[in-house]
Image: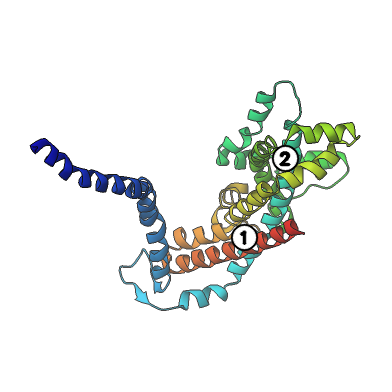
Amino acid sequence: MTQLATEERAGPRRGLLHRLDVKGSPYLYIAPFFILFLGFGVFPLIFTAWVSLHEWSLLSEEHTWIGFGNYTKLFDDPAFWNALWNTVSIWVISTVPQLVLALVLAHILNQRLRGQTFWRMSALIPNITSVAAVAIIFSQLFGRDYGLFNWVLGLFGIDKIDWTANTWSSHVAVSTMIIWRWTGYNALIYLAAMQAVPKELYDSASLDGASSFQQLRKITVPAIRPTIIFTVIISTIGGMQVLAEPLLFGGNGLTGGSDRQFQTLALYLYEVAFGRFDFGYASASSWVMFLIIVIVAAINFGIISRLRRS
């Protein structure tokens, strides 16, 4: 009788523990991520917004409240608008060719090739290469006097170009570095999506006489359109935060050239924060940069979604 009574009393407790385990365990499993996100994501974001409302310098312990003064100063700063234009220009020049080349490269890698694994792994090598090494090498390739690109242009009778001195040439040079680093990475993403496309569609298209390009345009692109949308959005976010390439290109430092001709938003923010030590103004710059990225990504997503529906 005693054992039976004990089991009867333990029954409700076991049922309660079981319900808590079923309903509560998932929250415990995901809790570490959200705790870290709150500590290293949300809190810095809120604190940066608070700092942007102050005159906050690392050279002084006094932090004066100035409201939206930093934002007003930012929108009146020609260097900010120049950095925004440079960022948009480099983003367009680098992203569009990069994704097109990645799509074509993925289509080629999706064919029956000898040594498929080798070629697919080789596509990722530029991405895992140190960005500092990439910038140094490309700075040499784009050198005015002894650069490889000017040597090739000279073969066609074209005068040497000072790639770091002009706006358009420096944008092309920086974009070339970005294209070289990220094309293979996006190609592997596209390739993974292409693996899910039924092979029967390609076999049927081949029997009907469709060329490889027609198969890419009529079968592959519609089938992996969600992946293309994903890469466009991710490339947009990454393109609006370009820092290392313009920072290291040509050895021009934080200004992005003698006339700020290739200074991006991220580089401008870095200059304000760690060149002038004006963290209040830098925080305002970072928040404006964050909002610009959100707006551009949303517009990009809207346009692509409309094209997808049409």
- Looking at the rendered image, the disc whose residue lies closer to the viewer, 1 or 2, is 1
In which quadrant will I find the C terminus?
bottom right
Q: Position of residue 105 (x, y in %)?
A: 74, 37
Q: Quadrant of residue 53?
A: bottom left
Kindly state the secondary structure of the residue where label 2 is placed: loop
Along the horizontal axis of the image, is 82 left or right of 37? right
Relative depth, front residue between 183 and 30: 30
In which quadrant will I find the N terminus?
top left
Relative depth, front residue between 2 and 146: 2
Residue at 60% from the left image edge and 65% from the top image edge: 295
Relative depth, front residue between 107 and 180: 107
Cβ atoms at labels 1 and 2 below 8 Å apart: no
Q: Residues within 10 Å of mark 2 (few under 14, many from 20)?
A: some
Residue at 43% from the left image edge and 70% from the top image edge: 52
Q: Earlier in the sequence, mark 1 or mark 2?
A: 2
Q: Position of residue 238 (x, y in %)?
A: 59, 52
Along the horizontal axis of the image, is 210 left or right of 172? right
Q: Position of residue 110 (x, y in %)?
A: 73, 32
Q: Residues within 10 Å of mark 1 (few under 14, many from 20)?
A: some
Residue at 40% from the left image edge and 78% from the top image edge: 66
Relative depth, front residue between 242 and 114: 114
Q: Quadrant of residue 240?
A: bottom right
Q: Position of residue 93 (x, y in %)?
A: 72, 53
Residue at 35% from the left image edge and 52% from the top image edge: 35
Farthest-out residue, top: 114
Farthest-out residue, front: 1
In three-dimensional space, the C-alpha distance between marks 1 and 2, rounded to whole angstroms, equals 36 Å
The residue to which callout 1 is attached is: 297
Along the horizontal axis of the image, is 309 left or right of 54? right
Q: Amino acid at mark 1?
A: Ala
The residue to which callout 2 is attached is: 147
